[in-house]
Image: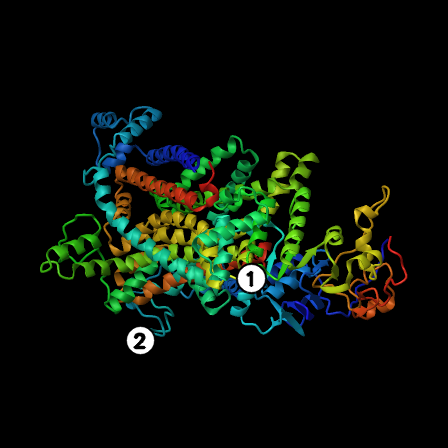
Amino acid sequence: MSLLEINNLSVLFGADPHPFPAVEGLDLSVDQGEIVGIAGESGSGKSVTMMAMMGLLDGQGRIVADKLQFDGKDLLTLSSRERRKIVGKDISMIFQDPMTALNPSYTVGYQIMEVLKVHQHLHGAALKQRALALMEMVEIPAAASRLSSYPHQLSGGMSQRVAIAMAIACKPKLLIADEPTTALDVTIQAQIMSLLVDLQKMHNMALILITHDLAVVAEVAQRLAVMYAGQVVEQGSVPEIFRHPLHPYTEALLSSIPEHSKGARRLQTLQGIVPGHYDRPKGCLLAPRCPYAVERCRVERPELETYPQGAARCFFPLLDKEAR
Amino acid sequence: MISYILRRLWLLVPSVLGITLLTFSLIRMIPGDPIEVMVGERTLDPVMHASALHRLGLDQPLHLQYVHYLSNLAHGNLGESLITHENVWSEFSTLFPATLELGIAAMLFAVVVGLLAGVIAAIKRGSVFDHGVMGLSLTGFSMPIFWLGLLLIMLFSVKLGWTPVSGRIDLSFDIPARTGFMVIDAWLAEHGDPSTYAGAFKDALMHLILPSIALGTIPMAVIARMTRSSMLEVLREDYVRTARAKGLSPARVIFIHTLRNALIPVLTVIGLQVGTLMGGAVLTETIFSWPGVGKWLIDAIQRRDYPVVQNGILLVALLVILVNFLVDVLYGIANPRIRHAR
Amino acid sequence: MTTHVQTSADDPALHYPSPLKEFWQGFSYNRGAVIGLCFLLIVVLAALFAPLVAPYNPVDQYRDYMLTPPSWSEGGSLKFLLGTDEIGRDLLSRLIYGSRLSLLIGLSAVVTSMLPGILLGLLAAFYPKLLGPAIMRVMDVMMALPSLLLAIAIVAILGPSMLNTIIAIAVVSLPGYTRLVRASAMTELNRDYVTAARVAGAGPMRLMFVTVLPNCMAPLIVHATMSFSSAILDAAALGFLGMGVQPPLAEWGAMLSSARDYIERAWWVVTLPGLTILLSVLAINLIGDGLRDALDPKLKRAA
């Protein structure tokens, strides 16, 4: 049994009769120790999926799913109290902008120790020791003096390390990283990513990596789900997807990676933008922008079909094409 | 932090000077000859007129008059009332505790009720309580204070007879003034001599209630709204999301992570309300015949008692500047970014 | 490669609304704002058509009907719907004529303080080295005095009259506008579009009024609405203290001043003028709230 199993998850915002589906019909499963990437552009619903699962949606979004199970527990029927016992402890999450993710009025040490106090009931010297150990684990230099630092005294990379320390404090089974390096300098990005991978291996955590940067996914993840406008459009193993993308969107994503553009030509992109609330197509969501679209695509919505190479949501998956 | 305080202190200087210039010019702007204005209807012998002008230094060029005025102020000489011939400063300092007592009581009411209402409204956003708080506070600062005072008197003093109509304490009590705060003095008197002063403390409190509510309503409304919107803003911040992602209880998220940061801007607002309070005190003291600085100023203005008007306004303004400075310092302490700057 | 594909039209496709419609949607979402707007319209109409709407002349005294209660109370008569005051003047007519004064004073004060305030604020933002701090110091001094005290002082000096009331309130509101416009303008000055306009050769006047000012309008409009309502309150306060509009002109605040002696005998003389002030100010504040919700994109349907 997988650690995390999601079947047919939809997240709806706004009132009937026309709620906005930020996520539509998502299936995902993650095993212990696996690294899964979720890729897509802004507005694809990748963050919302995970926030919904963690219960961080603020009451504005409605969650509808056939199955939402973590470690054998049904997240759909869990009371908020029960959920709080899991969140931060067995599942934790780090976010995109580390500079705003920490409370400016409390020391870094306090915020790390808070997780340990609440979930593991540590006190006094044991508490402080564990906090120090965590800070060293995330490679924060001079950890002892940093305990009493305030967030505004730390750089972006340092703050993200603190966030990671808070997230792994209770040795979670699943860590969700929502664009953890997007807001950081390029050199720091590499450091943080390698730290995450090391920690993952050390603790055999499952890691869900949400990103729009496919290069990162290629290096780190085993499986990948590509999202567009709230739907999963392709899913499969990373090597396979990169070699033979099945969905036109994935193909476009891959071809827009700068490394794939030879010479001084413009980067390849898809015309148009992601559909919003008011202009959701009746047919395939990519049809307005897809270079291969035909009449059927504009009228019917494709389902996610499984093929030997992976799964794709397209009537005409690119089964015979070679990737560039 | 030190540099922050010093900078604020440094900014005080032009403000203080500006206020003295303002009050100085205000009086000089009154149309007509100042001596004639002071003397009123009676005609004045030209020789006496000239000697009065000279005596008061009014025949000097304006900038010299201003310097003279400043030096008087520096020596603590604020002139005399034209009506009572009392020293302006001594009149002010006798009456000030009454206004201070009223102001503190009103502020306490405003802060306690306002903060509570604002926090609960933010937590229960969209609920009946939230709309109620918003509606009531909007009504609160749409209301003229003097009308609220009159209504309160009409309802609680006249109709229900629960509270007295005016003054600080029943006339039958002659409380010795030790601190200047009637409530404290009454309590001290009652405890010192229970037979003579039975019930004095309660009486003093009852006199204080209605004016404090009337005066404190607008600040309360402003504080409630500000607290609510500040809380809502902080609740949207990333670090609150992080706190929730850590699995912390809602109580912890609200009271430890949100409130602490939400209160910082509210502090500034509370400080600003002190200025409003002074203006409102004028009206409240008039309605409730509360013998404080506000009533004193109004009477002086109506009676053309110019030394009192000039320097009374100066004193009030200086007070407001002082309070704003203190609030700035408090804000610097509360905001960790400023506290830790060098 | 461009593919022009139409998004299907028979969708539950809601089209993006026009700016005016979007504004009205945002504004009318706030029911209180709409109610406020309706009430204000009534007041404005009453003020404009006072001679037609008011049953009596506000200064006429009906000696036989002094202190008549409102028509629905015991002792009241339909002749004087809201009763009469202590010298027999019809309350309803006085309230209606009073609305003229309040609205006029409020509007004049707002316009008189907004225009110089905008100018000073823009100047302070565009010339932050010397002119700016000088202007702001003066504003700080003006704000150091509680606004009511300053207004009272000004009226005390200039003498009580409607014009001086307007001047006093305008002077007291000026710093608020200056600060607001300066803060807004300084934020906008940092933005790229201003730099672009500067590079394109726009001179200071154009930059100030054509480039930057329109983008500061949203908070300015909200502030103007709120200051309109405080102008009415301040005018009433001055009237109450006997320093504003002089009798026999019917001003709401002044009506309350003479009503003080009748708290026990004639509740309507105290309650009704104050209620009118309250409802008018409340209506304007509600509109201000609605404007804020409609104009501030950050707060759209969030708070």
Query: Picture coordinates of residue A263 (x, y %)?
Result: 86, 42
In the image, C27 versus B267, the foreground residue is B267
Q: In terms of image quadrants, where is residue A32? A: bottom right
> According to the image, what is the colour scheme of the structure?
rainbow
In the image, C75 versus B93, the foreground residue is B93
* Residue corresponding to mark 2: C74
Q: Give the amino acid at mark 1.
A: Lys
User: What mark, if any, has residue B253 been given in the picture?
Assistant: none
**Which chain contains the residue that carries disc 1?**
A
**Which chain contains the residue that carries disc 2?**
C
In this rendering, the label closer to the viewer, 2 or 1: 1
Left-right relation of A278 to B135: right
Left-right relation of A99 to C276: right
Left-right relation of B177 to B258: left
Query: Picture coordinates of residue A296 (x, y %)?
Result: 86, 69
Classify 10 Å Cα crowding around label 1: few (below 14), some (14-19), many (20 and above). many
Classify 10 Å Cα crowding around label 2: few (below 14), some (14-19), many (20 and above). few
The vertical placement of A158 against A245, above or below, is above
Indicate the quadrant containing the C terminus of chain C: top left, top right, bottom left or bottom right: bottom right
Query: Picture coordinates of residue B143 (x, y %)?
Result: 39, 59
In the image, B73 versus C78, the foreground residue is B73
Query: Picture coordinates of residue B184 (x, y %)?
Result: 20, 53
Q: How many marks?
A: 2
The vertical placement of B11 against B149, above or below, is above
* Residue corresponding to mark 1: A89
Question: What is the secondary structure assignment of the residue under circle 2?
Answer: loop
